[in-house]
Each structure stands twice: as structure tokens, then as C-alpha cells.
Amino acid sequence: MQLTESEAQAAFNVDTKKVMVIDDCYDTLAIMKKYLESKPELKSSYFSDEYMALREYLDIMPDVVVVDLNLEEINGIVLTNLFNKLSLFAPKVILISKSRNLDKKIARCEIENVTYLEKPFSKEKLITEIEKKLGLVNYREVQ
């Protein structure tokens, strides 16, 4: 496998930020992968299986986790709480779901540093939310 020049630079850059994306819908994963390919400074890992994501979490140590609320076996809130127990530092979380009637306040109370995005969302919205979590965007700029 050959890396592009920008991928090689990102791989060796200590400032590279890591994003872990977890969704059991392959179509949604493919869309998010396409969205994030435009940001080579973000090293993104994609998982359709929550157990594989759990196994890889400590090796990746993501700065941001984008996780579907309704996974097949472990919901996104429980999975994020498991990540919190695995690491000294709680990941910054973007919880995604197509549930329109989800009580967002309950979800936010259960996990620190959580943002909720309702599917479908645009490329710009996803990237802006990730960059806000990473402190790469001034909040006033996106209001």
C-alpha cells in the first residue's frame, strides 16, 4: 500500500489529530470516509463493529470519537462510557443518530464533551463539529 504525500506527512506529524468513526451502517461509514478524506491532517479510523472498535481504542487513542447511538449490540452511550473507563482521558464525542425524538439532554448528561448530530448531516457540518472538538475552529466563526 502506497501513501500519498499528504498521507505520509500526516502519519509522521505529531500534530495529526485522530478520529475514530463507529457506525454499523456501511453506507454511513462510506459517506463519512468520503467526507473526511478531504482533511488529510485528520487520521481517521472506521469501524462497523463496536467490539473491534473497543479492541483498537487504546492503540488508536483518538482525539475525537464519532459514534452512532444505535449500534447493533452496544449503544453509542454505553460504548463511549466503556472508552472512558479504558483511558485516563475521556474522548471528545460526537454522537450521531437518525432518531428525531431522542432526548438530547439525557444523552449529554451521561457523557462529558458530547455533541449530537442528527442524520443526515452535511460534510461541512461533520467537519466543523470535529474541528470544534479539536479546538481548530473558533466557536464564534461558525455561529
Image (cartoon, rainbow, N blue to C red):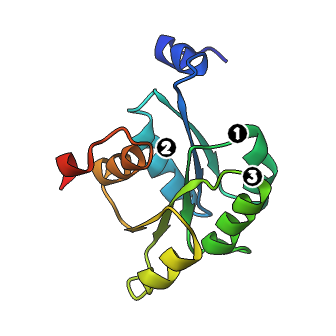
Which element type, helix, strand or loop, lies under badge 2?
A: helix
Instruction: Pick whichever, 13 or 100, lies toward us.
Output: 13
At x 58% / y 21%, what residue is drawn? Answer: 14
Which of discs 1 and 3 lies nearer the camera? The answer is 3
Which quadrant would residue 75 be assigned to in this image? bottom right
Between the residue at mark 2 and the residue at mark 1, the CA separation in whole angstroms equals 17 Å
Q: Amino acid at mark 2?
A: Lys
Instruction: Pick whichever, 135 or 25, lies toward us.
Output: 135
Which of discs 2 and 3 lies nearer the camera? The answer is 3
Image mark for residue 87:
3
x and y, in percent, of residue 6 in the image? 47, 16
At x 38% / y 32%, what residue is drawn? Answer: 38
Between the residue at mark 1 and the residue at mark 3, the CA separation in whole angstroms equals 11 Å
Q: Is residue 27 above or below residue 41?
A: below
Which of discs 2 and 1 lies nearer the camera? The answer is 1
Q: Amino acid at mark 3?
A: Ser
Q: Earlier in the sequence, mark 1 or mark 3?
A: 1
Q: Earlier in the sequence, mark 2 or mark 3?
A: 2
Image mark for residue 33:
2
Which element type, helix, strand or loop, lies under badge 1?
A: helix
Read off the residue under disc 1. Answer: 60
Q: Residue furthest top?
A: 5
Q: Residue furthest right?
A: 55
Neighbor class of circle 1 (other Cα within 10 Å; few <14, some 14-19, many 20+) is: some
Image mark for residue 127:
none
